[in-house]
Image: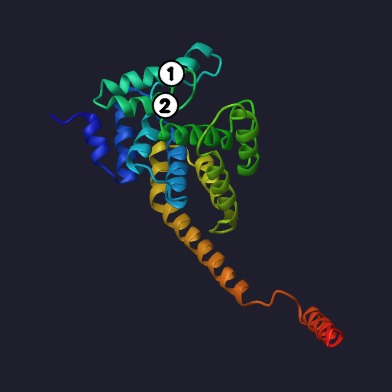
């Protein structure tokens, strides 16, 4: 008999996978809001563009479900410390494997689960970085470069995350990738703007999957092509200016004459 885990893992289209999670949340009242979709898209971008050798389908499914027992109450410290473990137990009851649930439990480090799964390090980065980009009641969202500095030098300062430096390269690249509509804007900042301007979760899924994704994929491809062309241009470009080259050649000729 097919379980819910089989059903959603067998569906590899990310838009459909998000819709499945949306309707599950409506039915079971698990946690699922725009921030989950937002962070899942960041995970997709990271996995696609940095060519991470990992099961993308499992990671994106985990992104959608690992916060299922999260609550919107930053004051409930006990719940903050326990929701990842509670979520993992809940997912186990829906047919997900022990290793998948362990991945989800390790989105944060409160359960002290060790050794950590590779996928968990990606979930941790996306969850913390994505959260810092979005507004909260007590603060406005950080810019991507600011969030990356905080992630590296504050949040994960004393812990090891095997993908941290690769993620920093990814964020730097995405700050160079521009998406142009009415105005031009770096790719991650455009995603934040769409999040902030869209009220309903279902509408946000549509905008991310059918409007944002094609544009960002095209923009990244153009960025990479530009970089490649510049590299080829540089290989054919003289190392020195014409004037400097003349001086060097004159110096060489002078040395040859002296030696003769």
- Furthest residue toward left: 1
Q: Quadrant of residue 83?
A: top left
- Secondary structure at badge 1 equals helix
Q: Quadrant of the rendered structure where residue 257 is?
A: bottom right
* Residue found 49% across the figure and 31% down from its top: 124
Q: Position of residue 154 (x, y in %)?
A: 64, 29
Q: Could you tell me if residue 25 is visible in this image? A: no
26 left or right of 256?
Answer: left
Q: Would residue 220 be found to the left or right of residue 5 on screen?
A: right
Q: Residue furthest top?
A: 78
Of labels 2 and 1, earlier in sequence is 2
Q: Position of residue 3 (x, y in %)?
A: 19, 29
Residue of label 2: 67
Residue 123 position, x and y percent, is 45, 34
Q: Quadrant of the N terminus?
A: top left
Q: Is residue 157 above or below residue 57?
A: above
Contact between marks 2 and 1 (CB within 8 A): the answer is: yes
Q: Dot 2: within a 10 Å radius of its alpha carbon, few (fewer than 14), some, or many (20 or more) residues?
A: many
> In x, y percent, where is residue 249?
78, 83
Quadrant of the image containing the C terminus: bottom right
Q: Secondary structure at mark 2?
A: loop
Q: Residue at x 51, y 62 (%)?
A: 224
Q: Residue at x 50, y 39 (%)?
A: 163
* Coloring basis for residues: rainbow
**Any part of residue 112 in sight:** yes
> Where is mark 1, residue-wise?
83
Whether residue 183 is situated above or below residue 208 in the rendered picture: below
Q: Quadrant of residue 168?
A: top right
At x 55%, y 45%, the residue is: 193
Q: Residues within 10 Å of mark 1 (few under 14, many from 20)?
A: many
């Amino acid at each position: 008999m097919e379980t819910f885990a089989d059903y959603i893992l067998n569906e590899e289209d990310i838009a459909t996978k998000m819709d499945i999670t949306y309707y599950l949340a409506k039915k079971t009242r698990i946690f699922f809001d725009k921030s989950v979709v937002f962070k899942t898209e960041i995970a997709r971008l990271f996995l696609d563009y940095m060519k991470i050798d990992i099961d993308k389908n499992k990671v994106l499914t985990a992104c959608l479900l690992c916060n299922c027992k999260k609550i919107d109450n930053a004051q409930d410290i006990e719940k903050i410390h326990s929701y990842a473990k509670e979520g993992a137990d809940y997912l186990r009851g829906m047919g997900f494997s022990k290793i998948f649930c362990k991945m989800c439990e390790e989105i944060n480090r409160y359960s002290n689960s060790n050794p950590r799964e590779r996928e968990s390090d990606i979930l941790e980065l996306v969850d913390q970085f994505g959260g810092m980009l979005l507004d909260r009641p007590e603060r406005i969202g950080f810019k991507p470069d600011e969030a990356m500095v905080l992630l590296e030098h504050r949040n994960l300062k004393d812990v090891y995350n095997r993908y941290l430096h690769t993620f920093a390269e990814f964020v730097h690249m995405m700050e160079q990738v521009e998406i142009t509509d009415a105005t031009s804007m770096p790719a991650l900042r455009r995603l934040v703007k769409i999040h902030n301007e869209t009220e309903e979760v279902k509408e946000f899924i549509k905008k991310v999957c059918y409007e944002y994704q094609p544009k960002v994929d095209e923009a990244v491809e153009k960025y990479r092509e530009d970089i490649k062309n510049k590299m080829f241009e540089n290989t054919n470009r003289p190392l020195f200016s014409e004037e400097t080259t003349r001086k060097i050649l004159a110096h060489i000729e002078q040395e040859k004459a002296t030696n003769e």
